[in-house]
Amino acid sequence: MPIKVLAFAGSPRRNGNSETLLDWMLGAMTADQDVVIEKIALTDANINPCKGCNACEKLNKCVQRDGMDIYHDKIVEADVILLSSPIYCMGIASQPKALIDRAQVFRSRKYVLKLPVVPPERKGKRLGVFVASAGQNWDHVFEAAIPSVKCFYHVIDINDADISYLMINGVDEKGAIEHHPTAKNDAEKLGKTVIAEIRKRLGL
Amino acid sequence: MEIKVVGISGSPHRHGNTETLLDSFLDGAKTAGASVEKVVLRDLDYTPCRGCNACHKTGDCIVQDDAITLFDKILKTDAIAVASPIYSMGITAELKGLIDRGQYLWARKFILKTLFFPNEHIIQHKGVFISTAGLSWDNVFDAAFPAITAFFNGVGFEYYDNIIANNMDAYEGIHRHPTALKEAFEKGQKVVAVLEKLKARIS
């Protein structure tokens, strides 16, 4: 049985610091031959912002037809969901914020319509990873990003305890992450840990 | 001199709770004698920041669209009220998209050092954050403040005040909230009075 890994690269800058971190992690995950990875660059994903119409509270689906039509199903099917973002102006970039806000359909399903997001037998068998980079060196630079990230994972049925974080500050210009003393190792290590854990959860 | 106030509505939802609260603030400012204008981000044509860092070299954004026009307008304004509902514990993607586009001003200030707002300028430019949230949690606005702080810093405005109202889902809308609309109206009046006094003192 394949282990489905879905990775959203949230930066508008391709192959920059946050995406490189994500790629290192995905690279370590592919060492497991059961892992099937799908990576999506949000800058090309055609995901519009949420319109705030609340129609999903009644319809159980979004009224917008765009890239989210595909990613909605992929989010349900994945075992591991990664999201990466650079920190811009003390928050996640607007592209991943749009994805997170469009997960409102899952929130409506879960909390308003009280319907399952994943089938009961898959509950507790999903993991999330948030990967971020920031130019600033401040320790608190990631703090305001985390609540939105948690919202995203909660509504897609991934609990707090099942979210891992890799957040590297002090990297701004493209390629800066390459010179970070621990980032590559940290990313690869976390990638392996997450796959080992999902194997356990899935009973593989 | 007439005080100029610009309200920026970051909600995709027209005339909802947040925009109504912004309208009340702008009405207050207007009755105090200010010229007011409302900009609805949903109606503008702009793209998110590309993170290309070209502005770090030139001080200008390579994308010239409505976001730049709006920043030009903000820089000629005395007070701005930035309004967004809380979605998923943060501001909307529309408003975050705009804020991130201010990177060229950050580059001018901190990399190129061609832009500097003296304190005297900053205290004469007031920024107000207006927000509503469906949830009742006391911390529901916390993750929005840092991006708003970054925005006001970037354009040389003092982060003057918040007008925030949570628990909208339970109130069933801003009109049923006991104090928010009145608070917004009064704060709109007050910011104009404060700015008039400051400008009179300085001139």
Image (spheres, rainbow, N blue to C red):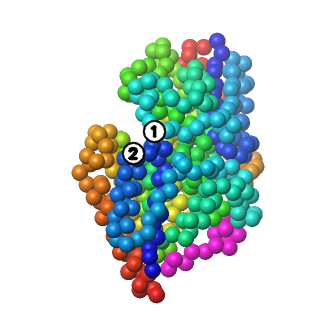
What is the three-letter code of the residue carrying label 1?
Gly
Name the chain under label 2: B
Query: x, y (%) of residue B162?
Result: 38, 59
- Residue A7's mark? none
Q: Residue visible at 37% across and 51% down?
A: B20
Decide if residue A181 is in sight here. Answer: no
* Highlighted magenta segment, given as a residue range: B106-121
Q: Is residue A178 left or right of residue B78?
A: right
Look at the numbered discs 2 and 1 and tell me whether their residues touch, using CB distance below 8 Å: yes
Q: Dot 2 lies on which element?
A: loop
Q: Quarter holding the N terminus of chain B?
A: bottom left
The local crowd at label 2, few if under 14, some if 14 to 19, many if 20 or more residues have their Cα within 10 Å, is some
Q: How many marks?
A: 2
Query: x, y (%) of residue A30?
Result: 72, 25
Residue A78: in magenta span: no
Q: Picture quarter containing residue B27?
A: bottom left
Q: Nearer the viewer, residue A18 or A94?
A: A94
Q: Which residue is mark 1?
A: A52
Q: Which residue is mark 2?
A: B16
Same subunit: marks 2 and 1: no
Query: x, y (%) of residue B172?
Result: 29, 40
